[in-house]
Image (cartoon, grey):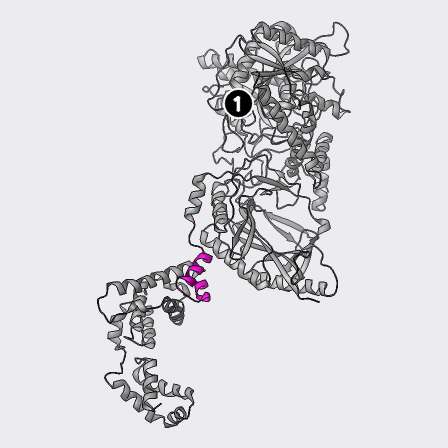
Amino acid sequence: MAELTDLTVAEAAAKIAAGAISAAEYFAAWREAAAADDLNAYLWRADGGPSSGDWTGAGESAPAGEGVETPYGANAPAPADSGPLAGVPIAVKDIFTTEGVPTTAGSKILAGYRPPYTATAVRKLTAAGARVLGKTNMDEFAMGSSNENSAYGPVRNPWDRERVPGGSSGGSAAAVAGGLAPAALGTDTGGSIRQPASLCGIVGLKPTYGAISRFGMIAFASSLDQCGPLTRNVADAALLLGVLEGKDPLDSTSVGLGGGLSLPSREDLTGLRFGVPKEIGEGALDPGVRTVFEATIARIEELGGNVTEVVLPHAEHGISAYYVIAPAEASSNLARYDGVRYGMRAAGDEDLVTMYEETRAQGFGTEVKRRIMLGTYALSSGYYDAYYGQAQKVRTRIAGDFDAAFGEVDFVVTPTSPSVAFGLGEKTDDPLAMYLNDFFTVPMSLAGIPAISIPAGLAAPEGAGDGAPGLPVGFQIAAPAFGEQQLLEAAHALEGALGFAAAAGDAVPWRGGDRA
Amino acid sequence: MPELEAVIGLEIHVQLATRTKMFCGCALSFGDEPNVHTCPICLAHPGVLPVPNEEAVRFALKIGMALGCEIAPRSIFHRKNYFYPDNPKAYQISQYDIPICGAGKLGEIRITRAHLEEDAAKTIHVGESGRIHGSAASLVDFNRGGTPLVEIVTEPDLRGAAEAAEWARLLRETVRQLGVSDVNMEEGSLRVDANVSVRPAGTEELGTKTELKNMNSFRFLQRGIEAELERQREIVGAGGTVEQETLHFDPASGDLTSLRSKEEAHDYRYFPEPDLVAIAPTEAMLAAARESLPELPAERQARYETELRLDPEQAKRFAGDPALSEYFEATFAATRADSETEDDSQSDTAAIEPRVVANWVSGDLIATLRAADKTDEDFRDPTVPPAALAALAAQVATKAISHGSGRKVLTILVEEGGDPKAIVEREGLAQMGGDDGELAAIVAAAIEGDPAAAEQIRSGNGKAIGAIVGAVMRETKGRADGGEVNRLIRQQLGL
C-alpha cells in the first residue's frame, strides 16, 4: 500500500475521480497507516469506531437543524465516490467537534465528552467527500508551542522522536509528516499551524481571519483563532482551503474568501515584491535557521522576485500584546468548563462552589491555569485599560504596520520559527522561552492576515555537533487579508524551486526515512 | 431637618416575543416542560458561536424609537463574565458602552439607554432558604436561557413610589402596543428593578442608592419602593447612612432582605464579544422600524386631551386600551358622518361633543355590558357597532329621546343588537316634549300627589325637587327629558 500513501491529496483525489484507484482502498490504506501511530499523534482513530449514542444532554441535534450523518468509524458509510475530496481521509485536530466522537481539545476536563454536533469545517470536508481518519493530539485548548501541554501526553516529532513536533497542532503536523495521514486540519491562534508545520517539515496555512468558519472549533482566543490545513505541499493546502473557506450562517465573524480559490500553478516569481522585516536582523534566531532563511531569499531572487527591507515597528510588541489578548479571551471562553453539563466532574461535590473549584483544579493543566489567571487579571476592573485596552492598541498598530508594508511589497517573509525542533522537556520550565517560539507568527495573527509556512531546508539544531542530522526549517510568507490566491501561487512557485522533499531525500519520515 | 425627597430610577427588562432565542434557533416558550427548548448553543457546548436574532434587533429598534432614543449607527456586544448555574457560558452577552439605543424620553422621564442582551436560565433552589446559599439542591431550566431581552434604564427622575409605578405602567403599555413583548410581570416577560435613594429636598447631590428586585406587579413595585423609602428616611433621619446593596422584596411579608452588598459586588470583566460583529442597522431597517410604530399611548393621550378636549383620566384610559380607543374613534367618526349626510335640519349631531361620545363608550356602554354579565371587552363583539352607538348618542343629543331612554335602548342593543331608531319606535321611547302639554299635565299631577315636597321646594329646599322629578320619570317611563321636567316643576310652582 506504500504507493497509495505516497500520493498527495490532489494526486489521490484525481486518481479516485478518474477511477484509477477506489476511494475504499485508498481509505483502507490510510487507516492501516494511521493504526501504526507510534508518535502519539492520534487521540482517536476511525478504526476504533465510535460508541456513539451515549450523549445524554437534552435538546435537539445540530443547530443548523439538519440531520447530521456521522461519517466516522466502523459504522461510517463507505467513502464517497464523488466530490473534490472523494475518499480522502483527513486527520482532524481534536479541537473540532465531531458528533458522537470523543472531542477533548487535549484537556482532561473534556474527557469523555462526545459532542452532539459537528464543526462546520469538518462538515465541509465530509460534504466534499472526505472522511475523518482520526482526531489528533494537541496542546490543551491550543495553548502551547510544543504539544507538551496535552493532557494525553506529548507528541513526538517524526524527524527525531526525542524532539517536539511544535504546537499546538502538533498531532496534526506529526501525523502528516510521519506518514500517518495525507493531510490534516489544525488551528492557528498565534502560530499553532505554522510553527508545527515548520518543525515537522510540512506546509501549514493560516488563512485570513474569517476565511473559514469557527463554528465547532473549540475556542481558545476567539478574535485570533483560525482553522487551516496542514499538508505535504502547497497544492494540497489550496485544495483543502478551497473546500473549507466560506461564509457560515453559524459564525457571524466568517466572511469566506469570495470568488473561491483555484489550485496554484505559478512557477516563477517575476515581478513579485517580497519584504523582509528589518527587525529580523535584531531578533534571536538560530544560525542554522538564518542560513536557510537567507538561502531561501536568494532563491526568491533567482526566481525573479524582488526582495527589499520593510519595517514593522510595532511587531516586536506582538508577543506582549498577544499574551494579554489571548489569555483574556481564553479566561472567558474556558469559564464554561464547570463539570455541570458535560466532560469531567470532580468527585466530592458536596456543594456547587467546591465542585466547580475541584473540577477546574483537576481538569485544567498548568499552562491553561496560568493563562486563565493572566487573562482574568488583565480584564479586571481597574486593569482593563492598562492591559487589555493597551494590547488592543498595539494590535491596531501592528495591523497598520502591515498595511503600510503591503503598500510597498506584495508579501512579507520571515522564518516561521526562530529554531528547529527542540528537545522534549527543553523549554517546559521556562514559559517565556516557549512563548518566544511565536515571535514570527504572532504579528500576522494579530493583524488577521494569511500566512503560510513551507519547508525550506534542513538545519542542525543549535549546539549540535558537526554532522548532526538536519531538522526542517520553515519559511513564512504573509499576504494582505484575503490574498490567499496570490499567497498560494507564490508559495507554490517557491516550493517547486526549493525542492525540499527531493533534497531531503530519505530523511523525509513519510518515506519511511525516520532515523530516530 | 428638611424633608427627604425620593429619587428613583428604574431598570426594566423586557423579554422580546421573537419566535426564537437571541443567539440560537431554539423556540421561546413559557410554562413548558423544563429543558426541552435547548441546543448546543444555548447550553454552551464547546465550540458553539452565537448568531444574533435579526428580529430581536428590529424589536429593539422599535422600542428605542418609541422611547425617543438615539439609535447607535454601530453598537457592539460585550461579554459580562460571572459564574452562576443560570449562565452556562459563564458570561452573558450584553451591551455595555455602546448600546443600540441611547438617550431618550418617555413622558417626563428621561431614558438613559436601552440595550439588547440575553436572558439567563431559570434556577430553582431547593430548601428553606430559597436561594443558592444553603439550598439542598439547585435545579436549572434552560428553556428561558438565551431569550432576547431589552434592558431599559431610566435616569433617576422619578420622585415617588406611586409615580414610579404609574410611569412603569405607561412604559408597559407603550411596549405592549409595539407588539414586541407580552409584558407580563407575573410571567416575568416584564421585570422592573428600582434604584432608590433619598436626599434633602432642594439639593442636587444623589444619596446612596439601593437596588430593589423581585417586584412582580405594579402594586408590589409601589409597595417595595414605599417600604424602602421609609427605611431610608428612618436611617437618614436618625443621622445614619444608607449602605449600597441589592434588596429582595418579599411581597408576602413586605420585607426587604439584602442579597449582596457593595463589598461582594461582582467584577464582570466586561470586554467586547469577539464572536460577534457590530450591529449596524441599515437605512431600510430603520425606516421599517419607524414606519411600523403605532400611535403610542403618550401621544394618543396628548391628542385626546388637546384636540378632542377629553378629560385627562378618560384620555389616558383610551390611550392605554387600543381596542377601546379604536372603538371610540369609530363611534366618534360615525357621529360626524351622520351629520354630514343627513339633510334633516333638525338633526344637529355635529353638536355632539367628543367627551359626550367618550362618556357613551367608557361609561354607558361598559356599564351596560357589565350589567348584562358581559366583560368590558365585549364591545369588540359587534352587537353594538360604533355606528349604532353613534346613532343612539345622536338621538339623545338631539333630545329625540331622553338619556334614560337612551340607556334602555343600549340595554336592548347589548342583548339583541338592532337599529336604535327602530328600537325607540318599537318601545315607544320617543321623548315627551313640552309642547303638546302631555308632560305638563303629568308634572302637575306629580306636584299634586306630593304636596309636602312641593312645599319644601317653595320654601327653598332645592333637593326636594328630586322626589317630584322621580315621580314624573316613573310615570313617563323615563321618556321625559330631565331638564325639561325640572323647568316645568319650577314653572308650575311659580318659582
**Other-residue count near label 1 (Cα within 10 Å), few / some / many at <14 / 14–19 / ≥20:** many
Relative to residue A405, is residue A507 depicted above or below?
above
Q: Is residue A150 magenta?
A: no
Along the viewing direction, whichever of B492 and A148 lies nearer the viewer: B492
Q: Secondary structure at mark 1?
A: loop
Q: Mark 1: which amino acid?
A: Phe
Relative to residue A439, is residue B98 depicted above or below?
below
Total labels drawn: 1
Q: Residue at x 50, y 18 (%)?
A: A87
Relative to residue B9, is residue B422 depicted above or below?
below
Relative to residue A170, is residue A390 depicted above or below?
below
Q: Residue at x 45, y 51 (%)?
A: B179
Q: Position of residue B48 (x, y in %)?
A: 57, 35
- Residue B385 shows in this picture: no
Q: Which residues are magenta?
A: B293-317
Q: Quadrant of residue A337?
A: top right
Q: Residue at x 31, y 73 (%)?
A: B396
Position of the C terminus of chain A, as image quadrant, is top right
